[in-house]
Image: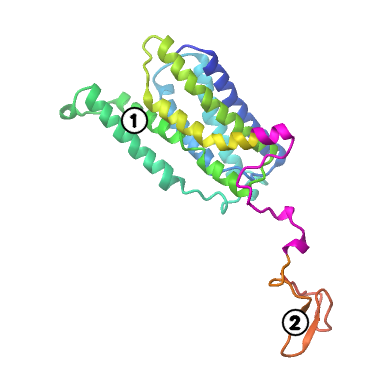
Amino acid sequence: MSMNIFRLTGDMCHLLSILILLRRLHVAKNAEGISLRTQELFVMVSLTRYTDLLTTFYSYYNSLMKIFFITSVSYTIYLIRRREPICSTYDRQQDNFPHWKFLVAPSAVVATVIFLIEYNTRRYGWESLTFHLFDVQEILWTFSIVLESVAILPQLSLLRRYRSIENLTANYVFCMGIYRFLYIFNWVYRAYNEPGYRHHFLVYVGGVLQSLFYVEFFYHYIKCRMTGKEVRYGEEGDIEYHDLSVEALRTEENSSPLIGNSDSGNLRMRGAQNENDSEESPLIVV
C-alpha cells in the first residue's frame, strides 16, 4: 500500500480531528454539542473496516494508525458514557437521531446487496455461492464504506439544534470533513498510479456523498472564520434565548402586571410578596 500526499494529508487531518475532540472533552469537561451516536458509528466503521489487522501486515504506519483510530474513538465513547463530569453533561434528548433504524440497518442491507451483485458478476455465479474468510471481510469492508458516508449525520443534526457551536467542536467537524474530501483524491490517485489497485466506484460515491453532507457546514464555518464571528450552523430564523432580553420575550398574551386569583380578589403586582407567602414555598411565575 503506497503513500501519497492526499492520503498522508487526509490521515493527518483525521488524526488532528480526533486530538481536537479529546482536548475539547478534557478541557471543557462537558459533552455539549458532541454526538455520542456519531462516535458509535465511527467505531463501528473502524472495527468493520480494519479486520485485515488480524490477517495482513502492510506497514507499521498502517497498523499503528488503524489501532489509534479504533482505540481513540472507543476512548471518546467511554468519556461521554462513563467519565464524570463529562457524562453528566451529555444530552440524550438532543442527540436523538435514529441511527440504528435509518443508518446502520440500511447500510447493512446496501452492503449485502452490493457484495452479492459483485460476487455474481465477477466471481463464480449463484450456483457456487460459498463464503470464506475474505468474503466476510469484503462484506464488512463494504458495510464500513456505506456507513461512513452517513455517520456524520447525527453530529450535524445535533449541531443544527444548538446552532451556536463551540470553537473546538467546530474545528473537529471541519477537520473530519477535510479528511473525507482528501481521501477521494487519494482513491483516484491510487487507481491510476498503484499497480493492482482498481477504481472502486462505491468508495467514490460514498466519499462524494459524505463530502456533500459537509458542504453547508463548510460554508458557515468559513464565513464565520473570515468575519471573526462565532461559528453558527443552521437557518437564520433559528432563535437562541441569549439573543433575546426578558422584555422581548414578554407579550400581551404571556405577561400581566398582576398575578393571583381574580375571583377571590387576591391580586398583587408581579414580584410583590403576599402575607400568606412563605420562604419555604416561594411563588414562581413563568
Label annotation for residue 139? 1
**Can you tell which mark lies on residue 172?**
none
In the picture, measured across the screen, residue 155 lies left or right of residue 258, that is left
Could you classify mark 1 by the number of other residues whose Cα lies within 10 Å: few (under 14), some (14-19), or many (20 or more)?
some
Q: Position of residue 201 (x, y in %)?
A: 37, 25
Question: Residue 257 at what x, y percent from top left?
Answer: 79, 76
Report the quarter where the C terminus lies: bottom right
Query: Amino acid type of disc 1?
Result: Ile
Q: Is mark 2 on a helix, strand or loop?
A: strand
Q: Name the residue under label 2.
A: 260
Q: Please tell me which of labels 1 and 2 falls first in the chain.
A: 1
* Depicted 249 relative to depicted 191: above or below: below
Three-letter residue code for mark 2: Gly
Assess whether residue 223 is covered by the magenta stretch. Answer: yes
The stretch of residues the image draws in magenta is 222-249
Q: Dividing the image into 4 quarters, which one contains the N terminus? A: top left
C-alpha distance separating marks 1 and 2: 68 Å
Q: For numbered disc 1, what is the local secondary structure? A: helix
Q: Crowdedness of circle 2 by 10 Å Cα count: few (<14), some, many (20+)?
A: few
Task: Please state which of residues 118 and 84 is positioned toward the viewer in this rendering.
Answer: 118
Image x and y of residue 237, in percent: 63, 51
Q: Which residue is drawn at 78% across and 63% down?
A: 247
Quarter occupied by residue 49: top left
